[in-house]
Image (cartoon, rainbow, N blue to C red):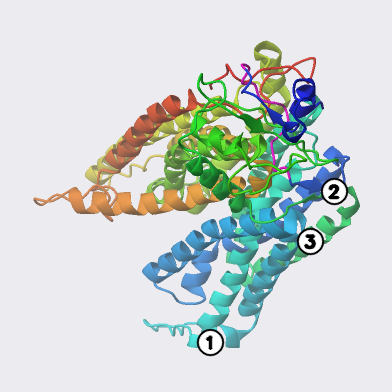
Amino acid sequence: MELESEKKDGKLKSSSRLSCCIKSPPESLSGDAKLAGDDKMSTIKTKPGGWKSMPFILGNETFERLGSFGLTANFTVFLLTVFHFSQVSASNMLNIWYSISNFTPLIGAFISDSYIGKFWTIAISSFSQFLGMVTLTTIAARPTMRPPPCTVGSQQCEGPTRSQLGYLIMGLGFLSIGTGGIRPCSIPFGVDQFDSSTPEGRKGISSFFNWYYMSFTTVLIICMTVVVYIQDSVSWVIGFGIPTGLMVCGVVLFFLGMRRYVYVKPEGSVFSGVARVVAAAYKKRKIRLPGDGAGVGVYYDPPLPPGSTVAKLPLTKDYGFLNKAAVVMDGDVTGDGKCRNRWRLCSIQETEEVKCIVRVIPIWPAGIACSLAIIQQGTFTVNQAMQMDRHLGRGGFQIPAGSLFVVSLITIAVWLPFYDRVLVPWARRRTRVVGGITVLQRMGIGLAISVLAMVVAGFVEIKRRAAARASLAAAHGGASPISVAWLFPQLITMGFAEAFNILGQIEFYNKEFPENMISIGNSLSSVTWGVAGYVSTMLVNTVHRTTGGHGRPDWLTADIDAGRLENYYFVIAGIGAVNLVYFVLVARRYRYKSKVWVDDDDDKGDNGDLKV
């Protein structure tokens, strides 16, 4: 690809020391197809692995998730029945562990993007994950590492000793470390295998996100059915041992693909570049930009290093204050055009990378509302199901209340292949957008569907409670409670919300973050879930304190038939509706960094006029 500085070369021959600069921002604010990155990024291998490397990456990810989720899907029951935790103690331990596991990806992402790269971060973290799984499997196998079983007729079971609790915490700690490295790097490492400067590469990236999430949901379905059944009905040792063995298969498969991978090597702290741009812009805050009438100077725009696979970002006019960091003043460059002080002068590439982060920041909070709605499936929806008829057929198999989440997962697993193979190509031919619709449009659709799902959940709860009260009023009339199938519409709707919004978030962060910070961008998805969990806790506590009174129970009282759970759902729907308005406002102002349009000529195409 012809570099911007090379295009301008003829205009700058009169000044050799400014041969790496351009005079003013171009009128066109279009981006390029490539996912942008740092000037210092380089690759060991320039030929993309493409789909040839996907069996190893997706296979490893599938086995790893089968292992980790298979181990933890039923972990609450393990703490209650094996370690004899109280309901509160088990809930607190899992909440703390989940929160830590949702924030450790930020640390893993920083280490990956700054120092050791995605491959070795995944490799080392997989080893830590394996150690955690071995520890927990050993706890289940060795009686001395867990409390003794409850004696028959005993009302007080013996709890864990300090050493037994230490073994448990050590195992969970290893799992959190493993999650911190694997979760933020697995998707970006897969994206690295495609050449985003070509139409086929961009299509491959969009398709990769869909297939990645489909495999993820398939794994969850298996874990929440087969593995949970083995743990409950056969043996905890076998139920933990199978996921541990699958984890070994995943690690072996990951290393077998080493010769096919593309490796992107980071250099230095990813945050230092952000700090340099802000510092340089502040030092030059009083100058006028070139092209602003009285403005003087030119922009510093050195070429990318030879062999770099990163596309050059054009200068844009939004957030013009940051552009001052790239304005060349007297003494900023040497005689051969090199920067004297990187804390006073930054390149256009570095400046535009910081803008990418600034543009993403307003979008990120909007994803919390969708996660907040999805989280309710694992708590109050389960409580609803426990008060409903869960039998299949007449007196047949009874569906476990905790397994109802599978309905949403099946929806995602069925929808994504259809969406990727049928709907996206059909929409692409009509909209000329690479993904059929833009990523922000996809996220917005998911937010709207999540609001609809909460409204549906509220009305279903009204019907469920009415049926329950009618059954109680009938007393011995033999009336059956309402079927659990009434919960399916809200679960299916929430599955569509997740397929659009959550997957859209993953794709958005991976495409729009600077390439040298792509793992950090991907970790924002985990942070979103962590924040949503805290928001859900605060919302529940607030509803407990502020509703009810005067002899009436609060909305979320322990007796669900006496409460008003539908009002809680409607509150979440209201929060989601307000959030949707906010999202539309900020999304309309967003300017894409990655390629959006499908073009016959890859060097053409303009994202500047596309806002959502």
When the figure is inspected, residue 599 is found, relative to residue 594, above or below; the finding is above
Q: Residues within 10 Å of mark 2 (few under 14, many from 20)?
A: many
Q: CA distance from mark 1 to mark 2?
A: 43 Å
The answer to the question of whether label 3 and label 2 lie on touching residues, with beta carbons closer than 8 A, is no
Residue, disc 2: 261
Residue 398 visible in the current orientation: no
Q: Earlier in the sequence, mark 1 or mark 2?
A: 1
Q: Is residue 581 left or right of residue 193?
A: left
Residue, disc 3: 251
* Res 196 quadrant in image: top right
Residue 240 pos. (x, y %): 66, 68
Which three-letter amino acid code belongs to the residue tagged 1?
Answer: Ser
When the figure is inspected, residue 555 is found, relative to residue 498, above or below; the finding is below
When the figure is inspected, residue 137 is found, relative to residue 324, above or below; the finding is below
- Determine whether the residue tagged by mark 2 lies in a helix, strand or loop: loop
Magenta stretch in the rendered image: 27-39
The residue positioned 80% from the left and 42% from the top of the image is: 305
Residue 186 is a magenta residue: no
Q: Is residue 144 left or right of residue 380?
A: right
The answer to the question of whether label 3 and label 1 lie on touching residues, with beta carbons closer than 8 A, is no
Residue 460 pos. (x, y %): 36, 35
Residue, disc 1: 163
**Nearest the camera: 372 or 555?**
372
